[in-house]
Amino acid sequence: MIPADTLDAARPAGTPQGVRRSRVSVTLVVGSVLAGLIALLAVVSLFWLPYPADDTSGGRLAGPGGGHLLGTDKLGRDLFTQVMTGSRIAVEAGLGAVLIAATLGIVLGVLAAFAQGWLDDTLSAFLDILIAFPTLLLAMLIVAARSATLGSAVLAIGLAQSAVVARLARILVKRVLTQDYITAARISGTSWPRIVLGHVLPNIWPTLVVNLALQFGLAVLAEAGLSYLGLGAPPPNASWGRMLQEAQATFTTAPAGALAPGILLVLLVVGVNLVADGLRDTLDPATGRRRS
C-alpha cells in the first residue's frame, strides 16, 4: 500500500486530489453517456423500428414530420429507421472486430514474447507486415473470397487490428517477464501456463483494455469507410457509411440524410475515445498525474 503522503507529494503543487478525480470522472461519464446512448439505440433497433427497413412508402426526400422524424431518403425510406439500423451495425462491427483482434492479438503477442532468436524475429516481421497491410486491400481480398457482407468487413478489420494488439501485447508481456515475481514463480515450480494466466495477463490487461477501446472506435470508422465503398453490409442494411454515400447527391435538398449518420458516427467515436482516455487515467494513476 502506497502511503497517502507519498501520493500527495507526487501530485503537482496546487492540484487538489478532488480536482484530478473529478476530471477523470467527467471524462468517463461524458464518454459513457455518448457511447451508451448510441448503444441503447442499437439495442432498441433489435426489437423495434418505426418502419420496416425496406418500406418505401414515405415519399422521396420528404422533410421531417408527417410520421418521419428525420424525413425520408431518395427511395422513400424512413431516415430514422435507417439511423437506428446503422447504429446496430456500427456497434456489431466494433464489437466483432475488437473480439477478433483481442483473441488473435493476445495469443500472438504472448507467443511472440516467449519466442527467442530467429522465431522472435520472424514473428515480429510478420506483425510488422500485417500492420502495414492496408485494411481496405485486405477487405477486398476477403470480399472476393466471401462476398460483400458485414461479416467480411468485420473479419478484415479484426485481422488488421489483431497485429496492433499483438505487437502491444508482446511488448507488455516481455516487460512483465523481467519482473522478480515471475522469477520467483518459476523457482517455486509454477508452470508457464499458470504464470501467464495468473501473473502476466492480469498485469497487462489495463493497458490492453484502453487500447481495445481505441480499436473499437477505429473499427467503427473502418466499417463506415468500407460500407461507403460498397464493401460492407449490403442493402437493405442501412450502414452509416452507405447512408453517407447515398445521401451525398441529395445533400443540398435533404441534408438530414448525410448529417444524421455523420453526427452519430462522430459522437460514437468521440464517446469511445473519451472512455478510453478516462480508463487510461483511472487504471494508470501515474499517467493521470503526468497529465494533470
Image: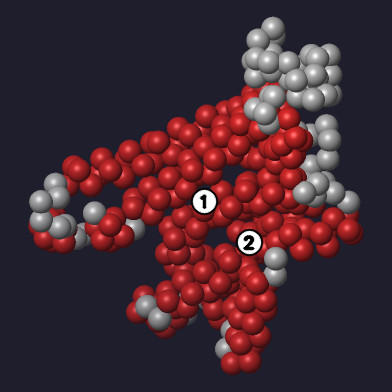
The residue lying at 45 percent from left, 37 percent from top is: 32
Quadrant for the N terminus, please: bottom left
Horizontal side of 154 relative to 179 (left or right) equals: right
**Residue 163 placement (x, y as % from top left):** 63, 68
The residue lying at 75 percent from left, 35 percent from top is: 249
Q: Which residue is mark 2?
A: 161
**Residue 285 placement (x, y as % from top left):** 29, 57
The residue lying at 69 percent from left, 24 percent from top is: 254
Q: Quadrant of residue 100?
A: bottom right
Q: Quadrant of residue 41?
A: top right
**Residue 80 placement (x, y as % from top left):** 67, 22
Horizontal side of 80 relative to 193 (left or right) equals: right
Q: Which residue is mark 1?
A: 213
Name the one closer to the observer, 234 or 45.
234
The coloring applied to the image is secondary structure
Quadrant for the C terminus, please: bottom left
